[in-house]
Image: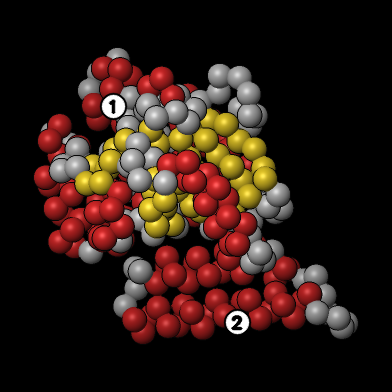
Amino acid sequence: MMSSSGSSAVLYSKRGPVAWVTLNRPDQFNAYNMAMRDDLFQVLAAIHDDRDVRAMVLRGAGQAFSTGGDLAEFGLAPSPIVARWVRFRRDVWGMLRALPVPTIAAIHGYTVGGGLEMALLCDLAIAADDTRLCLPETGAGMIPGVAGTQTAARRLGLGRALDLCLTGRWIDAQNALLVGLVAEVVPLADLDRRALSIARAFGRVARERSAILKLAVWGGLDLPLRQGLELERRLWKRLALIELDRSPGPVRGGKNANI
């Protein structure tokens, strides 16, 4: 599973402090099935526990980032609801969202449904110029079920999120940049290089600082401003204690040194 070879549904390697994660079902346009779920769960757990990792890039092999749930696997289940429960019973999405390191989605080609929702769960997304995106679930009688109804609104705002969810319309990379869905558009040939460059820049920040900053920003989205400011103050104090424990002196390496 955590290898750069073989037929694993997810490939994992490390490039210095950067975890390099590749969705690896290129013949199926990286459609998400149970094998990919299980592999991704293990990879994300390894990243969470590896304190040498300071940033992560999530990408797709072949011609697409991901086209979402595998329809062939859906067809084997008693119902779409049961299929979704079986595929998502491991909280892969919660784990991706809660990683204590910055996460970058490097998207290209078709980035559809659950594939787009995976990108929205990352802290930052950059897109190749060939990227085409949509959330088609409503047209299939469902709603986005990989946190898309929540992450889209937080990333794009209410009106744009409802537009994408309700219409299922396609947008290209430049429109995704215009509405704030992605932070940058690059030529396809430059996508991996640019994603790695951004990840290495994020990786210069100590893991504990990144984790606390992510808690402050993501956690604050769910709070009124006054409570968000209080969260910021509490987290600032926590970071100050970590730095104090690390400084020369009689008190070092206490329980605050880890998150």
Q: Position of residue 150 (x, y in %)?
A: 28, 55
Q: Position of residue 186 (x, y in %)?
A: 42, 51
Q: Quadrant of residue 27?
A: top left
**The C terminus sits in image quarter:** bottom right
Residue beneath the point at 23% across and 26% down: 80
Q: Position of residue 217 (x, y in %)?
A: 44, 70
Kindly state the secondary structure of the residue where label 2 is placed. helix
Looking at this rendering, what residue extends furthest in the top direction? 76
Left or right for 245, reference 232:
right
Can residue 36 be seen? no
Rounded to the nearest angstrom, the CA distance separating label 2 from label 1 is 45 Å
Q: Nearer the viewer, residue 156 or 62?
A: 62
Snapshot colouring: secondary structure
Residue beneath the point at 77% across and 76% down: 245
Query: Amino acid type of disc 1?
Result: Val
Q: Is residue 3 above or below residue 257?
A: above
Q: Quadrant of residue 243?
A: bottom right
Query: Amino acid type of disc 2?
Result: Lys
Q: Is residue 6 above or below residue 37?
A: above
Residue beneath the point at 42% across and 83% down: 229
Mark 2 crowdedness (10 Å alpha carbons): few <14, some 14-19, many ≥20: few
Name the N-terminal-most of marks 2 and 1: 1
Can residue 130 be seen? yes
Mark 1 crowdedness (10 Å alpha carbons): few <14, some 14-19, many ≥20: few
* Residue 142: mark in rendering: none
* Residue 237: mark in rendering: 2
Kindly state the secondary structure of the residue where label 1 is placed. helix
Q: Which residue is mark 1?
A: 82
Residue beneath the point at 59% across and 42% down: 20
